[in-house]
Amino acid sequence: MLIEVTINGILKSFETSPGEILLDLLRREGYKSVKRGCETGECGACSIILDGKLAKSCLLFAPQVSGHEIVTLEGMESFSKLHPIQRAFLDEGAVQCGFCTPGMILAAKTLLEGNPHPMEEEIKEAISGNLCRCTGYIKIIRAIKKAGEILKGNV
Amino acid sequence: MKVYSPETIEETTKILGKLKGNVHLLAGGTDLVVKVKEGTVLPENLINIRKLPLDYIKEEGNQLRIGALTSIETIHRSKPIRTYAPILSDAAGKMGSPQIRNLATIGGNIANASPAADTVPPLFVLNAQIVLKDQKGSRVIPIEKFFSGPGENVMRRDEILMEITFRKCAQSDEWFFSKLGQRKALAISKVSLAFRGKVNQNRLTDVSIALGAVAPTVIYAQRTARFLESKTFDSALIDEASRIIQEEASPISDIRSTSEYRRRMVGALLKQGLWELKAGVSPD
């Protein structure tokens, strides 16, 4: 079956099957920022933004997103320029092994778009569905705070 | 696996009435997709109901009506629910993670019939009604009659869960929802407890308590509720109630916890909640 889905602002069509998991489709189509972690909805490494909301691509059948809009980390850079959240993660050293980073950045994006002045508790809540196995949470939280400042124009 | 994506209720009930073999309804998919991948569920027919117009929260007089496809996150953030059923909003916010709450639906949480489902104890103390529909018509079932065992409910295979209705809570209602899991996010409850009641002149009235994950289905702790209404709201009452409630629970040991721990924690959650309630209503 053929599905049409807008990924990072570009309308794409893919051949898929009813039982294909969205995570598998995205990876085979080259969206490698979408990581294969637990595959049971626990770790958040496969997070995407679906119609403006954070979701886990391992919990969706590909045909379910037909006609919908997806953003992956690949869609955050523009003209090879890093998004301020990516910049903040780099500057704060919020990346250790890097496996959780795409999901963390997308979680930060959905948080900061609705709430540019998050409290620390709100940041923790926003990334509560994303596991960092290096346990580098302090720097991740610091990076998200800094990204908020950058996006507000305070830095 | 054959997949159907109906867009109307009529179309859906017609398909359900016609299909032979096993049928699964796909709403948010946060439980079903994992089960399909693990192979514990092998659907011959999958009906994707996400397009049905069942994503709503409506106020009608003193009633709230929630469409079965309303997401857990929407319920958590909904103003009418925060105002008129704050216990349900609170429990919704304690479920899963942001990603799960955005996809998961209240109808799915109920129909799945997990004894640990977090929206269900609040719906018990709200005396919620479940509206089911088939090709011929609808029927309404009180939530406490909806479950028949772990993962089992009274829905017939040709029925669809349409909506959940209940009376708005009064401003004077006191409530708490406590959940004990391995950690704050993404933990399935080892024990959960929903309490609703009123405090009048140092007496508790209209008490309703529901327990999750300590019996084959969510249950009312009726003996405890009646006991709490019988005497002055003091520390002796709290101690005795948290002993009685442990007798009402019949937990099992499983991967998440032991029956002994669950039983004690039911008492502890009640005790903690009642003490906080007491501190909140009587500053002395």
Image (cartoon, helix red, strand yellow):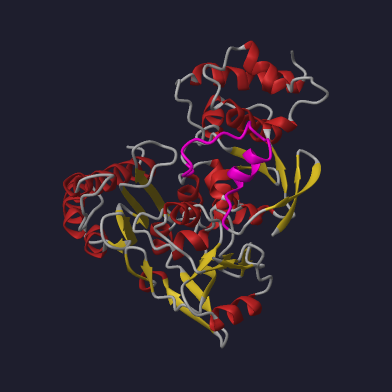
**Residue shown at the point (33%, 50%) measured from the top left:** B192
Q: Is residue A154 left or right of residue B4?
A: right
Where are the magenta residues, as a range?
A19-41
Main SS of residues in magenta: loop
Residue at horizontal 40%, vertical 55%? B117
In which image quadrant can residue A145 be found?
A: top right
Is A37 inside the magenta-drawn segment? Answer: yes
Identify whether A31 is placed above or below B215: above
Q: Residue furthest bottom?
A: B136
For the N terminus of chain B, which image quadrant?
bottom right
Task: Choose top left, top right, bottom left or bottom right for residue B207.
Answer: bottom left
Report the number of numbered marks. 0
- x and y, in percent, of residue A77 in the image: 76, 26
Q: Tell me: B148 left or right of B107.
A: left
Near-viewer residue (B118 or B228): B118
Residue B63 appears in which quarter of the rendering? Answer: bottom right
The residue shown at (51%, 75%) is: B131
Image quadrant occupied by the C terminus of chain B: top left
Residue at (21%, 57%) from the top-left corner? Answer: B249
Q: Out of B283 and A64, give the one closest to the viewer.
A: A64
B93 lies left or right of B199 = right
The answer to if A14 sits in the magenta stretch is no
Q: Is residue A56 visible?
A: no
Where residue A39 appears, as percent x and y from the top left, is 48, 42
The answer to whether residue B48 is visible is: yes
Q: Residue B220 location, x and y as percent? A: 30, 63
Front residue of A116/A7: it is A7
Q: Is residue B271 above or below residue B159?
A: above
Question: Can you give x and y, in whole percent of width and height, for residue B230 in the image?
Answer: 22, 61
Q: Residue furthest right?
A: A79
